[in-house]
Amino acid sequence: MESNGISEQKIITGDSGYILQDVPHLTDYIPDLPTYSNPLQDNPAYSVVKQYFVHVDDSVPQKIVVHKDSPRGIHFRRAGPRQKIYFEPDEVRACIVTCGGLCPGLNTVIREIVYSLYHMYGVTRVLGIEGGYKGFYARNTIPLTPKVVNDIHKRGGTILGTSRGGHDTSKIVHSIQDRGINQVYIIGGDGTQKGASVIFEEIRRRGLKVVVAGIPKTIDNDIPVIDRSFGFDTAVEEAQRAINAAHVEAESVENGIGLVKLMGRYSGFIAMYATLASRDVDCCLIPESPFYLDGKGGLYEYIEKQLKENGHMVIVIAEGAGQELLSESMQQDASGNKLLQDVGLWISQGIKDYFSKQKKMTINLKYIDPTYMIRAVPGNAADNVYCTLLAQSVVHGAMAGYTGFTSGLVNGRQTYIPFYRINEKQHKVVITDRMWARLLSSTNQPSFISNKEVIEDRKEHISGEEKNEETQLLDDENCADVVPENVDDSHP
Ligand SMILES: Nc1ncnc2c1ncn2[C@@H]1O[C@H](COP(=O)(O)OP(=O)(O)OP(=O)(O)O)[C@@H](O)[C@H]1O
Ligand SMILES: O=P(O)(O)OC[C@H]1O[C@](O)(CO)[C@@H](O)[C@@H]1O
Ligand SMILES: [Mg+2]
């Protein structure tokens, strides 16, 4: 399973076009590893559960809406406890690290990994790596016990700290070896999962019995394949408070405009879902949907119309929207992510100038930037449940000897996804999908795109679908839908 030092993809095929994109296993490069029976078999809480253990052949389809002749398509290995495990509890030395930006639910995932290891498998040696990847080689570790993590899910942030940059593969793997760590749990976004994949490759190259398992964390929801990331639900809910405030401010004055900036560097999911949830938003601007300001069909014309008809309006803008209209910034953060300019401030000024200078009209604009407030809260109830399932799933996978995988929710089921699927592209809103059309019909805003662009975009999207790439979160996205050749002129 090696070619040019990179593991080959493990693909298992079956009848009627069945494809399993499997995850690596320790036995792929360390043959004859001993196995042990899963201690959950003797645990009264679990042994009474019928079919508690996952069948070795269980898999979850990536697309659930099919036609009668559709091939069965791509599947992922179902997550959950296995009857055979590849670690004796006494032998396990686990570590947990959190990298990238904050996200609601991080502490819940840390807590539940520790609890799962201790209470399900009897593992008592769990270390916290402080300050992200660089903590492996530049900081001390902290022992994590159920007592230490007992209350942390009620707090925002991560008790381990986090960072961007500082991924030195060789130093990290040396540190893992030196400390005798054999299970590495890595919680982070798209950059972090790429880093985890490189660590896995190096560990496999050195032939170490060390599992590398990822837990996807991204408030922007920009990780592909999975239904959604933990923390996303909380972010959408928390954004409502800012949108409500913007609405109250806007409708209380003459020609009031409430402008809310939300996170979303390259993907506008928070803005899209927060807008759909609120129903007070008249215009939602996201990075995936270019817009223009002046002239017919432009943003200023729409604002003027709204103010004339309703006396006020609310705009939600994702931080990555319209960056191409601002002056080009070449600055990057420590991880190489482009540093964004403040589109909220820029557009506020643009709107004010347009109405005062060109229209000689008095407007009252209130700009609200709740971005870090939204990111720093603890996970809500739904996210906390999700974090628990993710943590338990990742621990079951590691104990079963799977490695080089990210644990993720696919069509409502916990799965193990190979790193290459998580890392191959960024998940974005597809503006020719039904979900964006639903938003447009909810806000009634202009689409800012011509029909020609729609057709081009759909063509691109269809070729993406052929590669099994799709928008997640809702029904239409996980189906093998056929897009008609004749695009309706009125859509979107
Ligand atoms: N291609 C890569 N290879 C190895 N390591 C990487 C790569 N990209 C990013 N990393 C490392 O992953 C860590 C986190 O990356 P980044 O700052 O991009 O955040 P992220 O995981 O994408 O989270 P988010 O963007 O949601 O805040 C950093 O320590 C960075 O050095
Ligand atoms: O944490 P930093 O470095 O300020 O970066 C903020 C970025 O992190 C994210 O929250 C997650 O990538 C983005 O939405 C945002 O652009
Ligand atoms: Mg990222």
Image (tube, helix red, strand yellow):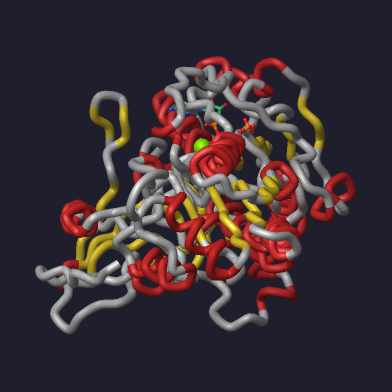
Residue 468 locus on image (x, y percent): 26, 58
Q: In the figure, is residue 16 to the left or right of 401?
A: left
Q: Is residue 356 or residue 204 the one in the foreground? A: 356
Residue projecting furthest to the front = 360
Residue projecting furthest to the left = 485
* The C terminus - image quarter: bottom left
Q: In the figure, is residue 179 to the left or right of 472?
A: right
In this view, 163 is above or below 431: above
Q: How many marks?
A: 0
Residue 63 locus on image (x, y percent): 31, 69
> Which quadrant would residue 258 be assigned to in this image?
bottom right
Q: Residue at x 35, y 59 (%)?
A: 447
Q: Is residue 487 or residue 128 the one in the foreground? A: 487
Q: Is residue 262 or residue 446 the one in the foreground? A: 446
In this view, 182 is above or below 262: above
Q: Residue at x 41, y 33 (%)?
A: 325
Q: Is residue 433 visible?
A: yes
Q: Is residue 177 or residue 250 the one in the foreground? A: 250
Q: In the figure, is residue 84 to the left or right of 450?
A: right
Q: In the figure, is residue 269 to the left or right of 113?
A: left
In this view, 403 is above or below 448: above
Residue 92 locus on image (x, y percent): 66, 41
> Which quadrant would residue 73 be assigned to in this image?
bottom left
Q: Residue at x 48, y 27 (%)?
A: 338
Q: Residue at x 87, y 53 (%)?
A: 151
Residue 241 locus on image (x, y percent): 73, 60
> Which quadrant would residue 8 be assigned to in this image?
top left
* The N terminus - image quarter: top left
Q: Is residue 122 visible?
A: no
